Amino acid sequence: MPTASPAPLTVADTVLTGARVRTLDPRRPWASAVAVKDGRIAAVGEEADVRDWRGAATEVVDLGGATLTPGFVDGHSHPVWGVDMSDGVGLSAVRDLDGLRAALATAARDLPPGGWVTGWGLDHNVFGDHPVHRALIEDALGGAPAFLRLYDGHSALASGAALAAAGVTGPRTFAQRASVVCDPDGPTGHLVEPAAMDLLADVVPLPDPAQRRARLLASLHEMAAAGLTGAHVMDMQGPGVPELLDAIEADGHLPVRLRLAPWCMPGIDTDGLDHLVALQQLHGRQWRVGGVKFFMDGTVEGGTAWLEHPDCHGEGTDAFWPDPAAYTHAVHHLARAGVRTATHAIGDAAVRHALDTVELLGDTGRFRHRIEHIETVPGDQLPRFAALGVAASMQPLHTAYTCADHTDAWSRRVGEERAGRAWRCRDLRDAGAVLVLGSDWPIAHHDPRATLATARLRRPAGAPDTAPITPEQALTGLMALEGCTIHAALAVGEEHEAGRIAPGYRADLTALTVDPVTAPADDVAAAPVRLTMSGGHVTHRG
C-alpha cells in the first residue's frame, strides 16, 4: 500500500509545538513541531515553520517540552469483550484462599435476591497445591450462584448453584479442546477453555446494553488518557459489536482506533470461513475488521498449552484443534482470500505448528501473519519468524504472573528448562523478527507505559525489589517503543501510514513528559501523558 499523499498544506487544523518530536522516521528522526490536517500529518518541522501553518481556525497546542512520538498501539487487547470479561468483583489482588473466600463472602452479602457473584482476574496461584475446585469456595457464598473467571481468560470456576442453573451435571464433548473437569462426585466447577465456559453463557448475568456501552466508552477514554491511540483487538465477541461501535461513532469520535480479528474455531466449514472473509469489509471511521484470530492451544496454568513434552502433571500434549491439519487448512483458505491471520500459540509445539503452517503457504511475501503470546519457544524456531515474515506478538506484563525462582504455577508446570526460556522478546528481536507488544487487556492492565517499562525491566514497574524474569530478554528503550508503534504497524501491514511521524501518515500521536526511550523505565511507567491524538482528534489532554 503506497504512502498516502498529503494534501497541499494551506491551513492546518491543529499544530503541535514546543515538543521534542521523536519521529521514528529515518529520513527525519527529530523535529519540534507537527501540523495536522484532515486526520493526517500534513507537515513536520521546526518552531520557525509554525507561522506558515497557522490560520484563524488553527488550534495551536504547546506541549511544553514533552516528547511526542507516534501514537502508542496495544498489539493485543480485548476492549469490547473485556467489558463482559471484567464484570463483577476484581480478584487480581487476592493472594490466597482465605483472601478469596473473604472477598466472595463480602460480595454474597451485598447481593439482591436471586443475584449472582461474578468475578474476574483470579490468579491460579491462589489455589496453591489444591486443584481448582468449587468446594474451596462454597461455604463463603451462602448458596449464591457464582462464576469466577481466572486471570488467563481461558478458564473459570463455577459454584454448584451456577452449574445447576445451567444444567451442567457431568462431562461434555466439544469440537475444540475443552473440558468440564469432573471428579468421582461430578463437576468440580473448573471449566477449561471457551466452549466449557460458554455452557453458562445463558445464565450468568451480563451488563445491559446501556451499561455495556457506557463501560466500553469509559474504558476507551482511560486507554486514551494513558497514551493509547489504537489497539489490535483479538476478538469480535459479544452481541452486536459492529453495531455498538457504529452507534458510538454516530454520537462522536471513538477515542481509540480499533482493528478487530474475529475468531475461527475448530469445526468451522467452508461457509463459515467464507463468512469470516466477508466480515473483513466491515468498518467505521475509527474501527475496522482486519484479520482472523485462531487458537492453537490454551494456557500453561490450565494444562492446555500445546507442549512438545508434557508438563509436570503429564498434560499439555494436545492441540486446541483436535486435528491440527484442519487448522492449517483453515489458515490457508483465509490466506488465499487475502486475510491476515493471528494465532494464539503459547507452547513450543503450538508455535512450531503455526510456523509450519505459514511455511507451507509458500507465498509469505504477500502479507504478514502473526503468532500471539509465544511464552516458551526453543532456539531453533527463533530465526523462522524473520525468514517466514511472521510477526511475534508478546505481552511483557504477563511475566508478572511468574517468579524468578520458578515457584509459581506457570513455571512449575513447564519445568526449569522451559521456564528458563520464557518470553524471549530480545532473542526474537535479535533474530530479526517483527515484535509487536501488547497487554491482552483485561488479562493484564492496558496502560502502554507499563508495557514499555516492563519490556525493559522484566519486572513490574515501581517494584525494584522484585527479581526480574529472564532478564537477558530485556528490550532497549527504542525496541520497546518500536514494539508499540512501527512494529505494531508492520504486524498488520500499515507501515506506510502508521507507526511514524511523517507527512501523509495518520495523525495518531502520543506525548509524554519524558522521553520513553532514554528516561529510566520506572519513570516512563509513571510519566504524565501530556496529549493523545487519534485520527487527528485530541482524545486526551493532560
Image: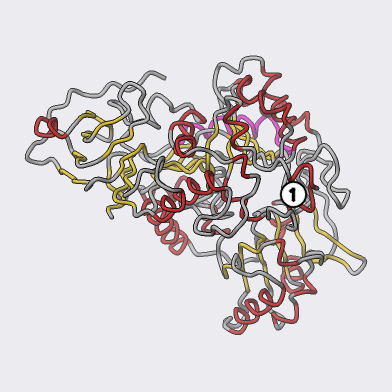
Residue occupying image coordinates x 29% and y 30%? 30
Q: Amino acid at mark 1?
A: Val
Q: Quadrant of residue 134?
A: bottom right
Relative to residue 44, is residue 415 depicted above or below? Answer: below
Q: Nearer the viewer, residue 215 or 510?
A: 510
Assess whether residue 101 is covered by the magenta stretch: no
> Which residue reaches farthest left?
56
Residue 534 visible in image: yes
Report how many numbered discs are placed on residues in the image. Answer: 1
- Compared to residue 420, the image places residue 11 above or below, namely above
* Left or right of 247, for residue 341: right
Q: Who's the residue at 72% across and 46% down the image?
A: 298
Q: Quadrant of residue 464?
A: bottom right
Image coords of residue 28 (percent x, y): 30, 24
Q: Which residue is located at x 63 percent, y 74 percent? A: 116
Q: Is residue 280 magenta?
A: yes
Question: Tag 1's secondary structure?
Answer: loop
In the image, 97: left or right of 52?
right
Question: In terms of depth relative to the viewer, which is nearer, 537 or 262?
Answer: 537
Residue 84 x %, y %: 55, 59
- The range drawn in magenta is 264-282
Task: Give neighbour class at mark 1: few <14, some 14-19, many 20+ (Cα, 10 Å).
Answer: many
Residue at numbered disc 1? 300
308 to 401, vertically: above or below? above
Work out whether residue 374 or residue 105 is closer to the camera in this orientation and state it.
374
